[in-house]
Image (spheres, rainbow, N blue to C red):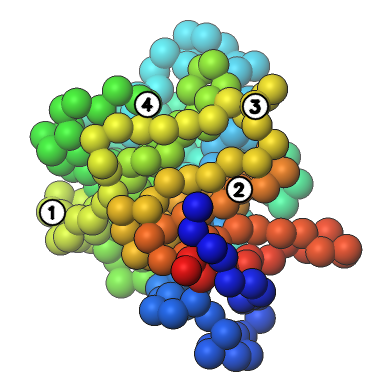
Amino acid sequence: MKKLTLPVILLLFIPVLHAASLPKDFDVKDFNSKFKTARWLNDYENVTWATTDYLGKQDPEKLKKIGRDWFCYQDRDSVWHAVYGSFDGNRYDVVFFLRIDSTYKVTEEQDIPSQSFLVPYARAIETAYARLIRDHKDLQVQLSLYIRKNGDGTFSVWFFPSMLQNGMAVYGGEFSYLLDASGTKILSSSGYYTGKFKGFPVENGPEEITLDYTDIDQPTLGGILFVWEYRKFFKKIMLETSRSISSVLRDHTGEYYWIHVEKK
């Protein structure tokens, strides 16, 4: 067991005050950027849970018309919306257009977005799926897709493992694609996958768990997202890389903060 040097703490909700206190070679700028994205992805996940619960109470015949090209997005006022429908390659047929407020209350809206708005999203989803399947035919777990339209009109698409039906929280594979504004061309791709997924039962499982990323130097976006998403289900989650261990703690006010410890 490697000896840990304590304490080395970094609060992610405020500027870093003493960069010298960070673990050696820890890329704080990269971590902050990934954590910002992870928080957005976690919001996206919460919106999908709220809307799928809503859809579960709707007409089963209407639900059959929904394909895999559904997606969520935030409008200019940061209000979340979800579009459920199907894409035939040219036109997006909307079955449900939903609005989600800050309390995750879901309401249906009639003012459906234009085809010029919907189609690029759907094409980006289809293009990313095609590349994922082409490059990784051996994946044995279901992946959740997240999509975001960036400020320059491009699309970011991420795939992370979904929780298994038996309640297993899974990590170990993540795939990211940047696409052009039309959604038809992949501009770049990145990811992390060692050939197998790992996981822990959320119910009746261990109170403290460690995510094994010891084959790399810096925490991945998927690892950070896992810690943040499941922080309320485990007493402690430690994200271990080759150089450091990161974890989320909770202070006396109920606020969460990150701690990073250098491995010796």
Quick check: 156 left or right of 249?
left
Viewer-nearest residue: 157 or 56: 157
Q: How many C-alpha atoms fall within 10 Å of the one at disc 4: few (<14), some, or many (≥20)?
A: some
Whether residue 30 is visible: yes
Disc with the residue nearer the chain's start (1 vs 4): 4
Quick check: 1 left or right of 150?
right
For the residue marked with disc 3, what is the amino acid?
A: Gly
Circle nearer the viewer, 3 or 4: 3
Spatial CA distance of label 1 from label 4 is 24 Å
Instruction: Please name the residue that numbered disc 2 is placed on.
Output: 237
Circle nearer the viewer, 1 or 4: 4
Mark 3: which secondary structure? loop
Q: Residue at x 13, y 38 (%)?
A: 135
Disc with the residue nearer the chain's start (1 vs 3): 1
Q: Residue at x 83, y 59 (%)?
A: 254
Whether residue 76 is visible: no
Instruction: Give the percent coordinates (x, y) of residue 251.
Output: 81, 64
Q: Residue at x 58, y 26 (%)?
A: 201
Look at the picture and state if 189 lies above or below 234.
below
Instruction: Give the percent coordinates (x, y) of residue 23.
Output: 49, 77
Residue 205 numbered mark, or none: 3
Mark 1: which secondary structure? loop
Rendered image quadrant of residue 90 = top left
Quick check: 83 left or right of 16?
left
Q: How many C-alpha atoms fall within 10 Å of the one at disc 3: few (<14), some, or many (≥20)?
A: few
Q: How many C-alpha atoms fall within 10 Å of the one at disc 2: few (<14), some, or many (≥20)?
A: many
Instruction: Give the percent coordinates (x, y) of residue 14.
Output: 66, 81
Look at the picture and state if 258 lies above or below 40.
below
For the residue marked with disc 2, what is the amino acid?
A: Ile
Instruction: Please name the residue that numbered disc 1 is placed on.
Output: 185
